[in-house]
């Protein structure tokens, strides 16, 4: 039996499945980060600015005859909140969309309101059928899989793309960034959050209703949105120097934004999932991933991370309140809910999954190769003005 080992730089350790260490004790995630950083992060500021200007010019050119030249999903978290400010600063005209899945904290609602009012944006709030969404979340809990956030993530992207097509918008602004989010260990979430077959199988086994209002977002829909409709995702935060601590202070001052005390804690459900369900049922502490990214990007020290990891993810009293609240909101008895949370984990692959190499899918991709090539060329000309 191999002995315990922690990375010499970050806080990932040998308890993570599949992790490896080099002779210097540097983990495989840090090694991947260093390769990525050499290409995208640790590059001259003028090069970042050039890349940013290029993508912004494309967004403006393709959206010049539209009321909105891009769309932005606003959760009220740090990344999307700063992205909203950055879009305004760059002269972009985003339509702000908020996905209300029934779990917003009061502070998240207030932060979103402040941001929209301060920046004078139009806001569309998408409220999904609660009874259907509740039944879908119940099904994911019952299934035993690790990524019970799939329904939310799936629906956010489905809605953003659907609205983009409806309004003729060609760019979705993304708050994802390498500097603070790179390196989630395999097995800590669903590899393909948009595996329509996996979602449907889980729901067919554990759900009770028919998802009448459910927007499908599987590989066929993604292919259509990206290759036919020509919708592109723009992670603007990857083209700037993004320092989380400084960003929090900035949006607090400029947008009256208030911190939630944890990454993605703007959602009560996500707070409970990351701070209670994952550590207790799956022995996963996502703070390790969040801290490791910050350590790699030079925004935190290992000592800071270790001190935080020695504490509870969030106050025990609040954990108990969330346990009661989530159980009640999802119509679980406490006995049933605790039984579900203590049951053995089940891998997502236990349920049906899409096969990227099945014959019908490969045939479809071959048939669409030429039309897609033509569409991409026309888009390039429209976005750049060059052949």
Image (tube, rainbow, N blue to C red):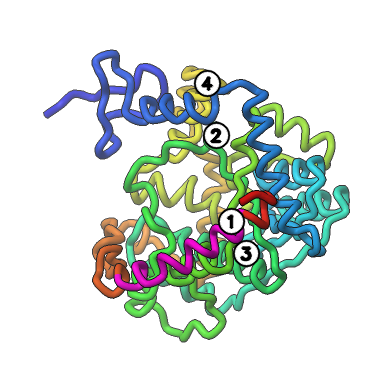
Earlier sequence position, callout 1 versus callout 3: 3
Query: Is 62 left or right of 148, judged from the image as shown?
Result: right
Residue 84: where, in percent of width, then height?
75, 47
350 sits left or right of 134 in the view? left
Left or right, 224 with respect to 161, comes to left
The alpha-carbon separation of the residues under discs 3 and 2 comes to 23 Å
Residue position marked by numbered label 1 in the rendering? 232
Residue at the front extreme, as displayed: 387
Circles 1, 3 touching at the beta carbon (< 8 Å): no
* Mark before the other along the chain sequence, 4 or 2: 2
SS assignment at label 2: helix
Specify whether 241 is left or right of 208. Answer: right
- Labels 3 and 2: the sequence-earlier one: 3
Q: Which mark is residue 266?
A: none
Q: Which residue is mark 4?
A: 304
Residue at the image position 41 percent from the left and 56 percent from the top: 147
Residue mark closest to the camera, 4 vs 1: 1
Q: Nearer the viewer, mark 3 or mark 2?
A: 3
Q: CA distance from mark 4 to mark 2?
A: 15 Å
C-alpha distance separating marks 2 and 1: 22 Å
Callout in the foreground (4, 2) = 2
Question: What is the quadrant of the N terminus in the image?
Answer: top left
- Residue 160 got which mark? 3
Q: Which residue is mark 2?
A: 180
Which of disc 1 and disc 4 is earlier in sequence? 1
Q: Which residues are magenta?
A: 363-380
Residue located at (48% from left, 65% from top): 372
Local crowd at mark 3 within 10 Å, few (<14), some, or many (≥20)?
many
Examine the structure image and report whether residue 376 is included in the region drawn in magenta: yes
Mark in the foreground, 2 or 1: 1
């Amino acid at each position: 039996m191999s002995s315990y080992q922690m990375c010499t730089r970050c806080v990932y350790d040998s308890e993570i499945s599949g992790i490896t260490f080099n002779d210097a004790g540097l983990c495989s995630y840090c090694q991947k980060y260093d390769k990525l950083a050499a290409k995208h992060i640790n590059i001259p500021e003028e090069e970042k600015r050039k890349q940013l200007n290029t993508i912004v010019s494309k967004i403006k050119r393709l959206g010049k005859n539209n009321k909105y030249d891009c769309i932005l999903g606003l959760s009220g978290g740090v990344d999307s909140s700063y992205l909203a400010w950055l879009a305004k600063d760059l002269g972009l005209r985003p339509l702000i969309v908020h996905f209300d899945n029934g779990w917003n904290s009061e502070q998240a609602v207030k932060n979103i309101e402040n941001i929209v009012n301060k920046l004078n944006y139009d806001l569309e709030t998408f409220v999904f059928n609660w009874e259907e969404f509740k039944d879908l979340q119940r099904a994911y809990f019952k299934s035993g899989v690790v990524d019970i956030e799939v329904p939310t993530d799936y629906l956010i992207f489905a809605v953003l793309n659907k609205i983009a097509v409806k309004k003729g918008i060609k760019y979705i602004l993304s708050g994802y960034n390498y500097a603070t989010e790179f390196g989630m260990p395999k097995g800590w979430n669903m590899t393909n959050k948009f595996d329509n077959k996996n979602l449907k199988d889980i729901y067919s086994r554990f759900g009770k209703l028919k998802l009448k209002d459910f927007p499908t977002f599987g590989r066929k829909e993604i292919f259509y949105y990206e290759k036919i409709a020509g919708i592109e995702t723009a992670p603007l935060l990857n083209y700037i120097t993004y320092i989380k601590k400084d960003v929090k202070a900035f949006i607090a001052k400029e947008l009256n934004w208030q911190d939630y005390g944890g990454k993605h804690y703007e959602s009560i459900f996500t707070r409970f999932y990351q701070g209670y369900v994952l550590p207790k049922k799956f022995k996963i502490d996502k703070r390790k991933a969040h801290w490791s990214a910050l350590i790699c990007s030079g925004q935190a020290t290992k000592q800071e991370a270790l001190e935080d990891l020695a504490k509870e993810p969030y106050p025990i009293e609040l954990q108990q309140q969330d346990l009661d609240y989530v159980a009640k909101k999802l119509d679980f008895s406490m006995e049933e809910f605790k039984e579900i949370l203590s049951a053995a984990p089940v891998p997502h692959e236990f349920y049906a999954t899409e096969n990227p190499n099945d014959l019908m899918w490969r045939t479809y991709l071959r048939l669409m190769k030429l039309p897609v090539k033509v569409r991409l060329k026309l888009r390039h000309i429209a976005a750049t003005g060059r052949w």
